[in-house]
Image (tube, rainbow, N blue to C red):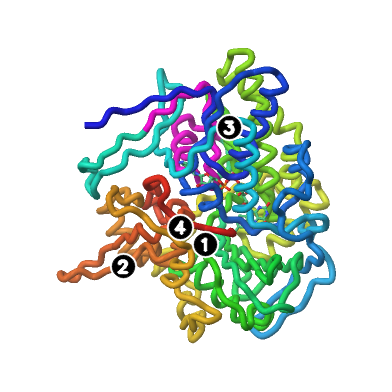
């Protein structure tokens, strides 16, 4: 029998991405300035800081000077300053370069980087300032007292598939905090329950997402230079599908290539991973990768709903920062600087509230005012209708966007609504387009040189999960899942997953069932977002489980 440890802290930060680390750094700096002596504790589920971080990334650097005013900028491990920045329109057999920048898409003055490496660096800065960082700790429960957040608890370990305690059972740790900061990134599993419990998305748009699959390649010298940036539009996507590719030249003859697709697509057999492989076979992309080798693979979702989908960000004793709060500017595909800024504003709010000894919702409301007065609002408000307009396709979306540019974001119709991605997939019978496999007939046999199947790619993510645990991917209602998700949607989960987790299996009685290979999960959260009827819930697995990204 194992007892539950309880520890006390002033501030608990859940998640060691840019938003959580910025919160920690800025809070430590404010405390030092004010002579406030606060315990700041950050928990990260990855085995190390950066191991669960995946981004493009081209980063807007100015916010780093705000966050680390005393640090020599050259010390920050960016990769290369952007030297050229082009948008390429792809067709199946050719490409042309747009002669201008689409508004908001210019990357002049920005830097390419591995966000994982940047986070590792930020973590060392945070620790130098006295922040306690514990990696390999998955937080799976919010603690409440009298209906108010009082901290969170890490996951119990040493249990079997059915939840039965084994000999090596270890109860999780209760961390009680005066303020808890939710910095879990996209579709945070605890943030989701917090939003539901307190109805924080009341009167807001539904959050909508994209899935981005990414590979790092090592290529022969001369294929691409550090700081060369390309974004592609068009093939292999159709007019009604939102998304495109990115190619970022890195140092040491490395290149980051990725493909991002809006999860509001309709075809139940659509597969973002496979679309990326088809994209790599185009002349434009394959020329850059020619003679190279795959080094790493990973995937993650991005919250794209924008300004109208940002939930209420505060409750008694708790704040939400970064992607968990939906801070991302489409069309720029940028969230890192917003994640950092939101963390800094949350830190100012927390320091102020703790100094006043008032961490009530009323006191924490100042966080929203700080955001409204910051560049976060300035960047997100003018593009508040951007992504919703594109749910009607590229042409109508493009027209809407033009009207938004003229009207300061309002467009012709004011606020545009959005639908949850889990509602947009059509059934096998209801889908009237050409199904994915027919559409890309002859292009989905992967050669393992330029293109890779999901199983091979998954190997390149380094992901692993302990066998001794309850499967962290949960079918919410088995009967409904069998009758609807399998029978009507053909188990779309096997296609929407960015790795090799879901398999449709026919048992010996001829019944179709979904097998879940949770050990392959990349923590992208697409199943939680896109499974029809919200059929799947993604929970955190044991701490230290999951991908082992090195340079994502
Ligand atoms: C394919 C892709 C390309 C992108 N390109 C760009 C780009 O070029 N430029 C740009 O500015 N932005 C880009 N973004 C967006 C950017 O990466 C995010 O906005 C940013 O990473 C958000 O930071 P965050 O701290 O909120 O979340 P994250 O970076 O996701 O970090 C969250 C951390 O919390 C941890 N965590 C989550 N839940 C728990 C839990 N319950 N317990 C413990 N730990 C937990 C996670 O393991 C993770 O380490 C891109 C995103 C994607 C997916």
Any magenta on residue 200? yes
Residue hosting label 4 = 522
Q: List the single residue furthest toward the left.
A: 509
Q: How far apart are labels 3 and 4 at the CA level?
A: 28 Å
Distance between mark 1 and mark 4 Cα atoms: 7 Å
The residues colored magenta run 173-202
The percent coordinates of residue 111 (x first, y second) are 75, 56
Residue identified by numbered label 2: 504
**Quadrant of the snapshot with the N terminus:** top left
Marking on residue 298 = 1
Give the mark, 2 or 4, whose residue is nearer the N terminus: 2
Task: Look at mark 3 in the image and give the residue it sits on.
Answer: 131
Q: Do residues under tags 1 and 4 come within 8 Å of each other at their CB atoms?
A: yes
Front residue (pair 269, 549)? 549
Front of the two marks 2 and 4: 4
Q: Would residue 399 be found to the left or right of residue 486 on screen?
A: right
C-alpha span from label 3 to label 2? 46 Å
- For the residues labelled 2 and 1, the Cα–Cα distance comes to 23 Å
Q: Closer to us: mark 2 or mark 1?
A: 1
On whether residue 25 falls in the magenta region, the answer is no
Based on the displayed image, in which of its 4 quarters is residue 354 positioned?
top right
Give the Cα distance between marks 3 and 1: 29 Å
Instruction: Answer whether residue 309 is visible to the viewer in this image.
Output: no
């Amino acid at each position: 029998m194992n007892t539950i440890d309880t520890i006390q802290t002033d501030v608990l930060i859940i998640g060691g991405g840019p938003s959580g680390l910025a919160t920690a750094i800025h809070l430590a700096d404010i405390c030092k300035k004010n002579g406030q002596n606060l315990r700041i504790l950050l928990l990260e589920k990855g085995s190390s800081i950066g191991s669960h971080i995946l981004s493009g990334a081209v980063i807007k650097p100015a916010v780093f000077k705000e966050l680390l005013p005393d640090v020599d900028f050259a010390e920050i491990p960016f990769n290369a300053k952007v030297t050229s920045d082009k948008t390429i329109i792809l067709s199946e057999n050719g490409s042309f370069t747009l002669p201008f920048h689409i508004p908001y898409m210019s990357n002049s003055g920005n830097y390419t980087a591995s966000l994982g490496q940047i986070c590792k660096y930020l973590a060392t800065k945070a620790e130098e300032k006295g922040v306690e960082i514990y990696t390999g700790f998955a937080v799976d429960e919010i603690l409440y007292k009298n209906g108010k957040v009082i901290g969170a608890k890490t996951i119990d370990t040493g249990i079997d598939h059915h939840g039965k305690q084994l000999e090596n059972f270890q109860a999780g740790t209760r961390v009680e905090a005066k303020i808890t900061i939710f910095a879990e990134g996209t579709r945070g599993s605890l943030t989701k329950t917090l939003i539901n419990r307190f109805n924080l998305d009341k009167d807001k748009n539904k959050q909508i997402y994209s899935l981005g699959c990414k590979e790092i390649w090592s290529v022969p010298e001369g294929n691409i230079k550090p700081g060369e940036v390309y974004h592609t539009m068009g093939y292999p996507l159709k007019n009604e599908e939102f998304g495109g590719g990115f190619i970022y030249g890195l140092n040491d003859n490395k290149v980051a290539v990725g493909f991002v697709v809006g999860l509001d697509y309709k075809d139940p057999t659509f597969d973002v991973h496979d679309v990326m492989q088809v994209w790599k076979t185009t002349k434009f992309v394959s020329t850059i990768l020619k003679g190279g080798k795959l080094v790493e693979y990973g995937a993650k979702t991005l919250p794209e709903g924008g300004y109208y989908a940002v939930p209420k960000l505060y409750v008694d004793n708790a704040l939400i920062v970064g992607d968990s709060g939906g801070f991302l500017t489409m069309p720029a595909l940028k969230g890192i600087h917003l994640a950092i800024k939101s963390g800094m504003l949350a830190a100012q709010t927390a320091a102020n509230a703790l100094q006043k000894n008032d961490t009530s919702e009323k006191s924490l409301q100042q966080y929203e005012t700080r955001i409204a007065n910051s560049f976060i609002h300035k960047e997100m408000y003018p593009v508040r209708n951007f992504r919703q307009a594109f749910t009607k396709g590229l042409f109508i979306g493009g027209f809407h966007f033009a009207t938004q540019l003229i009207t300061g974001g309002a467009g012709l119709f004011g606020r545009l609504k959005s639908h949850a991605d889990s509602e947009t997939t059509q059934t096998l019978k209801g889908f009237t387009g050409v199904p994915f496999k027919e559409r890309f007939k002859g292009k989905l046999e992967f050669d393992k040189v330029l293109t890779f199947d999901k199983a091979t790619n998954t190997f390149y993510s380094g992901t692993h999960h302990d066998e001794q645990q309850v499967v962290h991917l949960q079918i919410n209602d088995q009967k409904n899942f069998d009758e609807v998700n399998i029978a009507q949607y053909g188990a779309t989960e096997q296609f929407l997953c960015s790795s090799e987790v879901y398999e449709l299996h026919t048992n010996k009685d001829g019944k179709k069932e979904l097998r879940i290979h949770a050990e392959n999960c990349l923590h992208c959260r697409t199943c939680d977002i896109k499974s029809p009827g919200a059929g799947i819930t993604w929970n955190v697995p044991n701490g230290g489980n999951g991908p082992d990204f090195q340079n994502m």
